[in-house]
Image (spheres, rainbow, N blue to C red):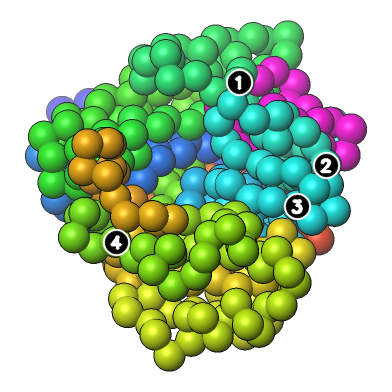
Amino acid sequence: MKIRLRYWLIGLCLVALAVFFGVEKFRTVAPRDRILIVVSLDAFRWDYLEKFKAQTPHLNQLAAGGVHAQRLIPVFPTLTFPNHYTIATGLWPEHHGIINNRMYDPDFKTNFYIFDNPGPFDGRWWGGEPIWVTAIKQGRVADCMFWSGTGAEIDGVRPTEWKPFTTNATPNGIVDDGLRWLAQTNQRPSLVMLYFHYVDTESHHHGVESSQVAQAVPQMDEAVGRLMDGLHRLQLDDIANVIIVSDHGMTDLSTNRVIVLSDYVDLKTVQVDTWGAVGGLRPLDGNVDALYNQFAGKENHFKVYRRENMPARWHYTDNPRIPPVLLVADEGWYINKRPVDPTKYFESATHGFDNELESMGATFIAYGPAFRQGVTLPPTQNVNIYNLLCATLGLTPAPNDGDDSLVQAVLAK
């Protein structure tokens, strides 16, 4: 009996040693040998993990087992293209140049829009160095699915493999394409970036509290579960790390909450660059003061600013694409050129408002062997994510506006 006990104890010690050294090996994978998958769930609000807790088991499991920010703070304006490109570059929109989903460049004398426009594929619009360019310049493979900016040649570089955005793609199809890239042992990417538009689309069309959003949220959870199962099937658990983000939140609108520009100014005298949560105006006669004064003192559910006097925390002054006069709507109000036509489509919800509003808050989760476990962070700025992406992969970051706070808080020691 004593002999059996002795052998049992020896065996237990050997198992413990094997586990210990296995864990140490698991934790000390060199950054250059790591894989990083960045998943964007457009408009997935920070509070959806709790609100839809029973329908999001995979996301909640990753949040509990990895690093989860209470709320990710987007950049202003809280729109898709500016925020995705800030996450990718670590730059404020005033520095990377994607200051809105639609904009006008006074040097190019042309407009940019995210749909049916050459701008998303034209590298001259895109400043800074996004993470896929950083990775490729430093000898890594980077594959991107639908991420803002990946269709343009930036500093002479495009992703190793990429696909232009289409609304026809299914969540499962996006995941499966990403897993096919990761299955390429001869050209396995170090970086994969995936984008899912579904929660954003359903929110715009039907509203935050709609049944359509309640169905889209668990679809995103199922896609994340499918991704994690695929990484396990490919035996990448020891080297694959996943960061899940969203670009902004969302709030409901009403046709009773519309700020009509034509009530304040003759639209024939101005160029309207942007509308929605943020209205951007350029006077055709060049008289900025006169245009500003047509709104100043008449603010009703909006604030008016000259570009140079925008709040410093928004970092939204230092770019000629930013119009000289800006109106920022109160939460849930919408800036429109003319009165709303009740016979035509009007969005049920939108975003773009002040980035410190809780309704604009986004999601951040980091899970994998490179990251700490069971950590909850206070509200966190998304401008710092680029440096984390670089540190995870052992890349030297390009100059940017972020700091190393997420690197220190997220990476395992």
Q: Quadrant of residue 169?
A: top left
Residue annotated with mark 3: 105
Discs 3, 1 touching: Cβ within 8 Å: no
Q: Position of residue 124 (x, y in %)?
A: 83, 42
- Mark 1–mark 4 distance (CA, rounded to whole Å): 34 Å
Range of the magenta residues?
145-162
- Residue 270 x %, y %: 61, 62
Label 4 Cα crowd, 10 Å radius (few <14 / some 14-19 / many 20+): many
Q: Could you tell me what secondary structure mostly forms the magenta stretch?
A: loop
Structural crowding at the residue carrying mark 1, measured as other residues with C-alpha within 10 Å and reported as few (<14), some (14–19) or many (≥20): some
Quick check: 31 above or below 336?
Answer: above
Residue 156 colored in magenta in the image? yes
Query: What residue lies at 61% left-to-right and 18% top-to-bottom?
Result: 163
Q: CA distance from mark 2 to mark 1?
A: 18 Å
Mark 1 highlights which residue? 164
Does residue 320 appear in the picture of this structure?
yes
Q: Which mark is residue 282?
A: none
Q: Nearer the viewer, residue 408 or 79?
A: 79
Circle 3: element type:
strand
Q: What is the distance, in whole Å, between disc 3 and disc 2 at their CAs? A: 11 Å
Q: Is residue 128 left or right of residue 11?
A: right
